[in-house]
Image: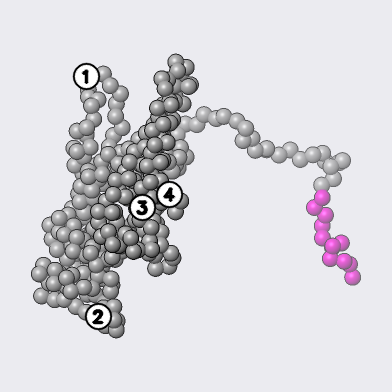
Amino acid sequence: MSHPEQSRPSRERNVDQLGLPRLRRIDRAQMCWHAVDVEQLIEEDHSARGIWDLVGRLDLTSYLEPIGSVDGQAGRPAIDPQLLISLWLYAYSRGISSAREISRRCEYEPAFQWLTGLEVINHHTLSDFRIEHREALDELFTQVLAVLNAEGLVTLERVMHDGTKVYANAGNRSFCSSKRIEEHLKIAREHMAAMGEPDADVADLRCRKAQERSRREREHRLMHALSEYEAILGAKPLSYNRASKQRTGASISDPEARIMKHSAGPCALSYNVQVSTDAAASIVVAIDASQTAPDYEHLVPAIEQIEKRLHNLPKQMVVDGGYTSRENVLALYARGVTMFGRSYGDGRQSTATI
């Protein structure tokens, strides 16, 4: 009986008789020119095309008014607001909320390349657009809901409402007292004063401009943190500030964040995000990020937001025990909204009806 190893045919090449094999090697150390058909980068039913078409149907007048560059006059053409809005909407649909990440994906991801026409959008442009047009983007959300409502996709027969604590993009070390914030602010202003006059060299000029921008942004954040700290003190009784074991202060990197308790973790700088969703279509009809931790304070504002956006009230609101309070039951009853909520005590369901 032969050994298994001996019964196998030999796969080794006789180099002496046949020579070395000729293979196509991969060359990655090269530069290439490619002809790209932009329309073929994504399929016809891709979501990026749908977002682009949807944004094109909306009224974008409020985004065009601040643009100073007009036909027949000097000035660099501005980036089309339809493009910037579409980029943000598509990025959000992919779970991307960073301007830097969007700018990076414009360099290689087909859907982003299709939207931009192979151009790369600077992350500062994306970030500034989101900040400067906050109110207009809120109105855009209303217009999108109006389109969905007109198509019969939003019925408001039953709306599910809930909230969740979301960690702020700020570390615990950024949480400072007013004294510490003022020290940071003093240092930032000293750095700005030490910059002096820019040199004539172009490379140095660009570097100094970038440094100036960075330090101006830091000074702005510190001043904002100081104002938020004063707002916190004004909102809390003095006895609370003295007796509470929780530190009173503000974050120098995310001044609007507040210390909140998480159900599955310790207290941390956070926001309380409230979301209302149409149950039939699974479409968000109201959303808000709050600085206050208790959930029951946000139910009535959510109802008012839905009414403002869709000019109609939900027939039913389904909430958990965090929203079940006497004030909320009476408020929804007065508006003719049926409220389904769970009580804190024995877990029995409580309902407010007309």
Residue under pointer 2: 349
Choose between 171 and 49: the one closer to the eye.
Answer: 171
User: In terms of image quadrants, where is residue 289?
Assistant: bottom left
Nearest to the eye among marks 1 and 3: give it: 3
Spot occupied by residue 146 in the image (x, y as percentages of width and height):
18, 53
The span shown in magenta is 1-12
Cα–Cα span, label 1 and label 3: 52 Å
Q: Is residue 320 magenta?
A: no
Q: How far apart in space, not on screen, are marks 2 and 4 (Cα)?
A: 42 Å
Separation of marks 1 and 2 at Cα, in angstroms? 67 Å
Question: Residue at position x 32%, y 59% from top?
Answer: 241
The amino acid type, in three-letter code, at marker 1 is Gly
Q: Nearer the viewer's eye, disc 3 or disc 4? A: 3
Q: Give the number of the disc on residue 174.
A: 4
**In this image, 165 relative to 324: left or right?**
right
The image's mark for residue 249 is 3
